[in-house]
Amino acid sequence: MKKNYFLNNNIFSLDKILMTSILSIPFTIVILFDFGAVSVLLIPIILYFLDIKANPSKYFVFFILCFLFYNNIIYYDTHLKLHELRLRYFSLIFLLISFCINLICLKNKNLIKYVNVFFLFLSISFLITKSFNTFNFFDRSSFLKKLNFEYKTSALEIVKSDDPVILIILDGLSSSEEIFKQTNDSTDFKLDLYLKKRGYDVVPNAKTESLRTTISLPSLFNFNLHNSIDKDSIENIDKGLQTIDGFQEVFNENLLVDSLLKRSVKSYSFGIGEFTRGINNDDFCYLWGDSCLGSSLDNIISKTIIETIIHGLSRDTEKVDLFRKNSLEQLENLAPEKNSFYYFHLFFPHDPYSYYDEYPNVQLNYLSISEEEYLSEHIKYKRWFVDKFINLMENADFKNSRIIITGDHGFRHNKSIAPELTNIYLKGYNSINLNNGITVQQIGYIIFESFFK
């Protein structure tokens, strides 16, 4: 009589086999809630049949899948909250622990049921927390309270008008002076000199108070969240802030856009994320959001150690170049209107160093690249982009607009370059006294005070 695997009691007995199908359920829940990728349901189904046909745990499939599914999820959930290990060291420890659990269960069959039950409870836990987060709406006031944030009036003198304001973020823009120290080549002042001739004030070696875009921009759009933070090294402040959830949400629901709305100023985002109470473009690829998501397979892989390996060996440029293309096209075709604020985020000169056929992707092994090579490629890419950006600014019709161009942080991958230094360029703000310097995070004040009450 043919054996019926579905009716075999051993299949449903949690103390017989390390069930890879059960192991995959928490991972499946994460993908479903984060990306809505229904195809991820195939993973536990396929693994269930694997459990039926064979005992995968005796071939150490269990520990490999455990490492594959959960290494990155657990790392990013615990990093800086429970430890400060680099991913590579955490991965080695996690790999060893997974292997030992698999080995111990093979030696002592009585422990198998505890491992299976653990992943069942983990599944329930993930389901509850993900469901709660989905229906638990972000509360900006509570978030700001965590930071002890207080709005502080800016002392900057700004002439008010109804002329439009355009903010252009150049991601990872290194300080011209910092680069010149390394190259001794005046070419690296090309953007500074060009913009000076066009009537811009140049703030060299402008400082950012965060080295991470995920913190730097939310701070800028919320009137400098760093105002209420005790002064410490940028690295230590960033570490502390990374343990607090909600920075992307407070970027979307930022104070600047809401404050401008009270002055009847419309805010448009062609940047890294949408404005909750601003005007967004349905056809735009926002990196922080669902509009730029990849395929279901890409989303599934993004949560695994495979993504780390692929991303380390060579950056995926498809999504980034699409975002760059959308941003440049919107900026080039912009027709600014009075009483309007426009935010652009150009993902230049940040890596990956690519832009379709205009700048074929530079294949770099980011896991082993030297600081010297990284800096060299950054300089070449930055020089190429500066020429492209100058051409764009030549053709754009921004005569009656006030413009702010800044980096969100500097170049972070070479010890000889100060990563907190970037450049700020201001057009239409001659009244501001720049002798005391301004930081990137103060720009929100400048934009707000640009318009009539």
Image (cartoon, rainbow, N blue to C red):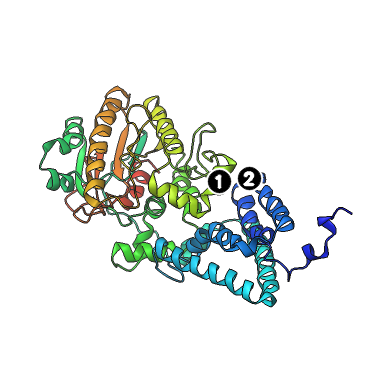
Q: Do the residues labelled 2 and 1 touch (CB within 8 Å)?
A: yes
Mark 2, residue position: 37
Image position, residue 51 (x, y; %): 71, 58
Q: Can residue 381 be seen in this view?
A: yes
Under circle 2, the secondary element is loop
State left or right for residue 327 relative to residue 73: left
Give me the residue at 57% from left, 61% from top: 66
Q: Say above or below: 335 vs 120.
A: above
State left or right for residue 38 relative to residue 258: right
Image position, residue 231 (x, y; %): 29, 67
State left or right for residue 419 relative to residue 24: left
Q: Can residue 245 be seen in this view?
A: no
> Which quadrant of the figure has residue 187?
top left
Q: Quadrant of the C terminus?
A: top left
Q: Which residue lies furthest to the top in this view?
A: 395
Instruction: Name the amino acid, label 1.
Output: Asn
Q: Say above or below: 299 vs 135.
A: above
* Residue 163, numbered label: none
State left or right for residue 284 relative to residue 86: right
Give me the residue at 54% from left, 38% from top: 291
Q: Quadrant of the N terminus?
A: bottom right
Mark 2 vs mark 1, CA separation in Å: 8 Å
**Sequence-first tag of 2 and 1:** 2
Mark 1, residue position: 299
Give me the residue at 41% from left, 34% from top: 321
